[in-house]
Image (cartoon, rainbow, N blue to C red):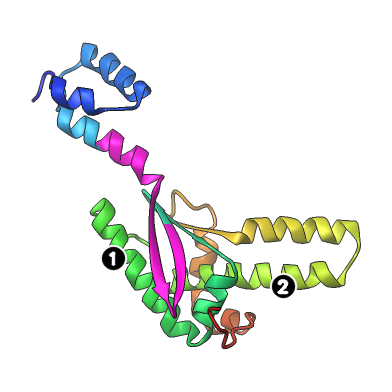
Amino acid sequence: MVILDIQRFKLVKKPWIKFIFLLSFGTQTFDLCVFVRILMHTMSAERIQKTYAIRMYSLKVGFKPGVVRLYSDERLLAALSLAPYASTARLIKAIKKDYFSIFNVELLISDASLMVEIWGHLAAAYWARILQKKVKWSAVRSLTEWVIVRSDRIDCGIFHKDKNRWLWDVLAPFRNCIKGLIPFKRTSPH
């Protein structure tokens, strides 16, 4: 056990982490290295981002413990268009590999469930935009705007972090039907 390591304590930049450390220090003995590492990892995990190149498109993915975040936009749709199943599977494999290297634990979401969640968000955003252009009623426009905002950010989380994980797990066997709802087409990155 480390009572106090002044050099490592000085490296901590966030004042509130130092405050928590000092409060904890007075009440118990603990391993400072582990404590600071866990806190810093938790804080920085919210900001970890990786970029993946799929078919010449750059896709940003954010990582935090138990959750990966993608963005449902034209780049994601175009990147997955040529070979939706293979491209999505390759993206999921890369995300899971990096998740393990960042957090040293497996992302406990099945590939099929992740695939359905990504495609489900793409389909919802696509059809909401179509409906928004066709229907001019304010109630429909409000609903479609809500769907678009909710669908544009894809937060794929494990069970206790993602309250709708059960839905994607249930829909996973129907991924070919969901894929049919998305207008995958050959597109140019430029």
Q: Dot 2 lies on which element? A: helix
Where is 124 relative to 49, above or below? below
Q: Left of 66 or right of it: where is 178?
A: right
Answer few, some or many: residues within 10 Å of disc 1's Cα (few below 14, many 20 plus, some between 14 and 19).
some
- Residue lying at 36% horizontally and 45% vertically, measured from the top left: 45
Q: Quadrant of residue 34?
A: top left
Q: Position of residue 52 (x, y in %)?
A: 39, 68
User: Which span is picked out in magenta?
Assistant: 38-61
Q: Is residue 55 magenta?
A: yes
Q: Residues within 10 Å of mark 2 (few under 14, many from 20)?
A: some
The first of marks 1 and 2 along the sequence is: 1
Location of the C terminus by quadrant is bottom right
Percent across and percent down for residue 148 are: 69, 61
Question: Is residue 87 a member of the stretch shown in magenta?
Answer: no
Identify the residue at horizontal 27%, vertical 54% (top origin). Answer: 102
**What residue sits 77% from the left and 73% below the top?**
130
Q: CA distance from mark 1 to mark 2?
A: 32 Å
Q: Which residue is mark 2?
A: 127
Q: Which residue is mark 1?
A: 97
